[in-house]
Amino acid sequence: MSIFPTNNLVKLAIGAGHARRVALADQLYFPVSVDLFNPALPMMGGYVGNRSGQSQRLVSPGAGGNTGGFGADFDGLSGDPVAVVQTMTSDGPIFTVKRYDGRGDITVDDPRINDATSGTVNDFSTVPRYLIKADGYVYDLLELRGVDGAPLDPNHPNFDSEYKHWEISGAAPLAGYDNTTNTYTPPFNNTQITKAMYARRVGQISFRDKQGASSGAIQEQLTRIQSTLDSMSRLMRSLHDEAKGPFANMVIR
């Protein structure tokens, strides 16, 4: 049977108490993604879509395909507000960008689309659209490209005005784009995407403090832990004082 000095058990309790206090203090704040140029506003975003708010593949052709909009519930031109979720891992916290309702990561293609490109190298429904890097900024894999004021093909029946479209920001502009059909074929497939391709800043992470009942509950737990730590500290001082007397070799079996 192992023998442990009494003060070692107290040190273990104090260490566990401090770890719990740090974890609770971290819960007093939550991450949000804010607009890059106006931190008072939330960051907007979403899946690749058209300007009617309908989700489209990055490779969707035609006037109703990838025409520089977002697959969004509320605003096809600027997207919906996005949410940021913090996940603790062995390597530290990881932040991911999710839909405004917290359900599912925002990917390049809407995973609910089922068409001929599903499961192919041009299906980007498993590739995150946004990446939060170590500098605290949110980067978009895509960039809006096209030529304003120049109709792509005025004789084509599907075109009644000029269109911009989403392209991979790390690729050369207009590489893989066919302006006669408004079709973008990315020069990189879904297995070749790297962190370096996330090149366009669109937002940044901000930490806000919790309010109301949730904050009160955490504060109450912090108070209890602090009371326990005070008791353990007093016990530790008592053991140190006893170590100067006849009970210097007291152990727990």
Image: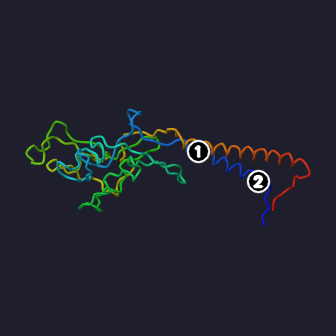
**At 41% from the left edge and 38% from the top edge, which residue is drawn?**
34
- Residue 232 spot, x, y in % from top left: 75, 47
Residue 214: name its quadrant. top right
**Separation of disc 1 and disc 2 at Cα?**
31 Å
Which residue matches tag 1? Answer: 217
- Residue 98 spot, x, y in % from top left: 40, 49
Q: Earlier in the sequence, mark 1 or mark 2?
A: 2
Amino acid marked by disc 1: Ala
Q: How is the image coloured?
A: rainbow
Q: Assign the N terminus to one quadrant of the image.
A: bottom right
Which residue matches tag 2? Answer: 8
Q: Do callouts 1 and 2 mark residues in contact (Cβ within 8 Å)?
A: no
Residue furthest right in the image = 246
Could you classify mark 2 by the number of other residues whose Cα lies within 10 Å: few (under 14), some (14-19), or many (20 or more)? Answer: few
Residue furthest left in the image = 155
Mark 1, mark 2: which one is toward the viewer?
1
**At 41% from the left edge and 33% from the top edge, which residue is drawn?**
40
